[in-house]
Image (tube, rainbow, N blue to C red):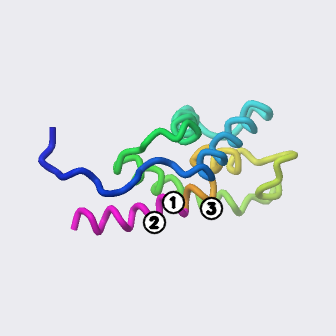
Amino acid sequence: MTNEPPIPLDLTPPKTVAAAAARGLALRAQFGRGGTEIGVRRAHQLAAREEVSPEDIMRISSYFARHEVDKQVRSRVWGDERNPSAGYIAWLLWGGDEGRRWVTDLKAKLKGWRA
């Protein structure tokens, strides 16, 4: 048990983030590529709209920072769901562009809370 007060933020993934993660899971099942087992576990968490921890927010933010370069894929068109790249599927597993916006906003709010 910690002495920190409860976080005054809703850490439940928004429906748009859940939908992106679910779409990533569906594409991964259909095409047999994209993401790691960690990404798949994260997608299940997001798709189920399970509350995440502040540490999860930092991990998700870190994923997006590391994988922004995946959008520069040349062998496929980013966002093409008829023949998606593994990177695009993985991006969706972590919540897609909606997830990135969500964690960026939460990360800023969490910094203010802990300051």
Find out whether the residues at labels 2 and 1 contact each other: C-beta distance under 8 Å.
yes
47 above or below 64?
Answer: above
Q: What's the CA distance linking mark 2 and mark 3? A: 21 Å
Does 62 appear above or below 52?
A: below
Q: Quadrant of the C terminus?
A: bottom left
For the point 53% across and 33% down, which residue is it? 41
**Residue at left offset 24%, top offset 50%:** 6
Count of residue discs:
3
Q: Is residue 112 magenta?
A: yes
Q: Determine crowd level at label 1: few under 14, some 14-19, many 20+ residues with C-alpha closer than 10 A.
A: many
Q: Residue furthest left?
A: 3
Residue tagged 2: 105
Closer to us: 31 or 48: 48
Query: Which residue matches tag 3?
Result: 69
Q: Position of residue 30 (x, y in %)?
A: 79, 32
Q: Amino acid at mark 1?
A: Trp
Give the image location of residue 47, x and y in percent: 59, 39
x and y, in percent, of residue 50 in the image? 47, 38
Query: Magenta stretch: dominant SS?
Result: helix
Label 1 to label 3: alpha-carbon separation: 19 Å
The residue tagged 1 is 102
Question: Magenta stretch: residue 98 in it?
Answer: no
Write down the region rendered in magenta.
101-115
Determine whether label 1 and label 3 are within 8 Å by CB.
no
Does residue 30 appear left or right of residue 43 in this picture?
Answer: right
In percent of width and height, residue 15 lies at 60, 49
Structural distance between the alpha carbons of marks 2 and 1 = 5 Å
Q: Secondary structure at mark 1?
A: helix
Amino acid on which disc 2 is placed: Asp
Circles 2 and 3 in contact, beta carbons < 8 Å: no
Circle nearer the viewer, 1 or 3: 1
